[in-house]
């Protein structure tokens, strides 16, 4: 059985981890770490100390609904989660991370818009004369 890193738990909530196939379990937000424990296999767990988290990115739909969030660690990896109440989970995490590490991921419309802007710039650069060409 895994030993919790936390000495105090602020929030314990049902969750899904999207590392590989979806795994159901519980998330604990405590004073030392963010922890996920698989409900079927107690040896399958994720413990991320607050000092190892680079930032957290939340996927927001319709400016209100948080569908899931990803925790990006300093070693370059990330973990995707969804809890029964993502907003409550992120608020509990904010106490330990601060507002500057909680980010909003770009939505589908933002990604498509950025793609069209990039295509437009690429096309305009094809027909743009350089000063040296004259």
Image (cartoon, rainbow, N blue to C red):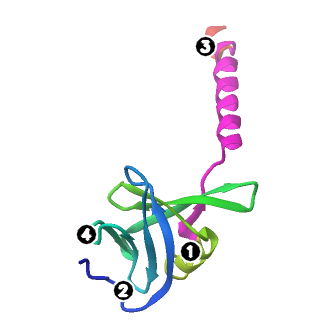
Q: How many marks?
A: 4
Per the rendered image, the range of residues in magenta is 100-128
Q: Nearer the viewer, mark 4 or mark 2?
A: 4
Q: Residue at x 64, y 32 (%)?
A: 115
Q: Nearer the viewer, mark 4 or mark 1?
A: 4
Q: Nearer the viewer, mark 3 or mark 1?
A: 1
Q: Is residue 81 magenta?
A: no
- Chain-order first, disc 2 or disc 3: 2
Tell me whether circle 3 and circle 1 mark residues in contact (CB < 8 Å): no
Residue 44 rendering spot, x and y as whole percentages: 29, 66
Real-space CA distance between mark 4 and mark 1, rounded to the nearest whole angstrom: 23 Å
Q: Which residue is mark 1?
A: 89
Q: Which residue is mark 2?
A: 6
Tell me whether circle 4 and circle 2 mark residues in contact (CB < 8 Å): no
- Chain-order first, disc 4 or disc 1: 4
With respect to residue 104, does 111 lie above or below?
above
Q: Which residue is mark 4?
A: 43
Q: Residue at x 42, y 86 (%)?
A: 31
Q: Which residue is mark 3?
A: 132
Depth order, front residue of 128/132: 128
Q: Secondary structure at mark 3?
A: helix
- Please rate how many residues cluster around mark 1, counting C-alpha atoms within 10 Å: few if below 14, some from 14 to 19, many from 20: many
Q: Seen in the image, is 15 located left or right of residue 44?
A: right
């Amino acid at each position: 059985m895994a030993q919790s890193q936390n000495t105090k738990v602020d929030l314990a909530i049902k969750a899904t981890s999207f590392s590989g196939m979806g795994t159901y379990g519980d998330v604990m937000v405590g004073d030392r770490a963010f922890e996920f424990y698989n409900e079927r296999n107690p040896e399958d767990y994720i413990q991320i100390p607050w000092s190892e988290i680079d930032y957290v990115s939340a996927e927001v739909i319709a400016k209100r609904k948080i569908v899931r969030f990803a925790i990006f660690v300093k070693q370059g990896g990330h973990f995707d989660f969804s809890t029964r109440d993502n907003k409550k989970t992120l608020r509990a995490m904010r106490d330990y991370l601060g507002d500057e590490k909680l980010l909003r991921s770009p939505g589908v419309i933002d990604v498509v818009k950025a793609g069209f802007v990039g295509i437009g710039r690429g096309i305009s650069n094809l027909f743009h004369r350089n000063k040296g060409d004259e």
